[in-house]
Amino acid sequence: MAVFAPGGIIQEVVNASSTRVNLSTTTTGTWFETSSAYRVSITPHLTNSKIVLRAFLPVNQQGGTNCLVNMTYQRSTNNGSTWADISNIGTTAGQRRNMITTVRPYGYDGNDATEHVFFGVDTPNTTSTCLYRMVFQFNDGNANWYVNYSQYDNPHWQWNGCMTITAT
């Protein structure tokens, strides 16, 4: 959808997916994508366009009591052949990486739901189609994420969800 307004164009693309993903890691420090079903693409009309990214991700997460999960957005202008971190997400200090967010799970129940909302702003400096994805990094080698559903699948406590990612 595009809205033409004096001095600019506002467009919005929404991707909603109920694809279930079980992310289990035994290593730390590795960046990975949750699912290619969780991507969104948008074509900027102007080279100075700003792209605002918003994602809602329902997760049943389990890990150590001090398990941190880092997340950032990446952009591709060649349909996913190569990826780059988006611009405008802060400055790097020493060995630290630019982040959108870091989350700490709560609970350790196979039915706990944690709703994560991630925001980002990008200035892609192009009018080519931009494909966006979320990438994550666990700092605990025993972390598990159940995206869009709870670990325990029973008629009393289970839940199913739908993630959304929006580019405006």
Image (cartoon, helix red, strand yellow):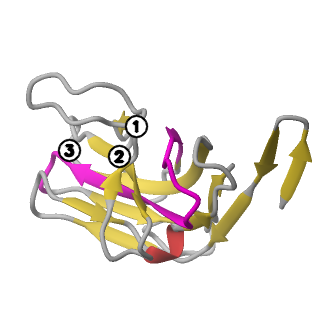
Q: Position of residue 77 (x, y in %)?
A: 44, 66
The quarter in which the N terminus is drawn is bottom right
Q: Seen in the image, is 85 located left or right of residue 118?
A: left
Q: Amino acid at mark 2?
A: Met
Question: Where is 55 relative to 27, above or below?
Answer: above
User: Which dot marks residue 71?
Assistant: 2
13 vs 29, nearest the viewer: 13
Q: Nearer the viewer, mark 2 or mark 3?
A: 2
Q: Which residue is mark 1?
A: 100
Q: Nearer the viewer, mark 3 or mark 1?
A: 1
- Label 3 to label 1: alpha-carbon separation: 22 Å
Q: Tell me the element at label 1.
A: loop
Give the alpha-carbon distance from disc 2 to disc 3, as whole Å.
18 Å
Residue at the spot of label 3: 64
Q: Nearer the viewer, residue 108 or 118?
A: 118
Q: Pointer 2: residues within 10 angstroms few (<14), some, or many (20+)? A: many
Q: Residue type at mark 3?
A: Gly
Q: Residues within 10 Å of mark 3 (few under 14, many from 20)?
A: some
- Magenta residues? 115-141
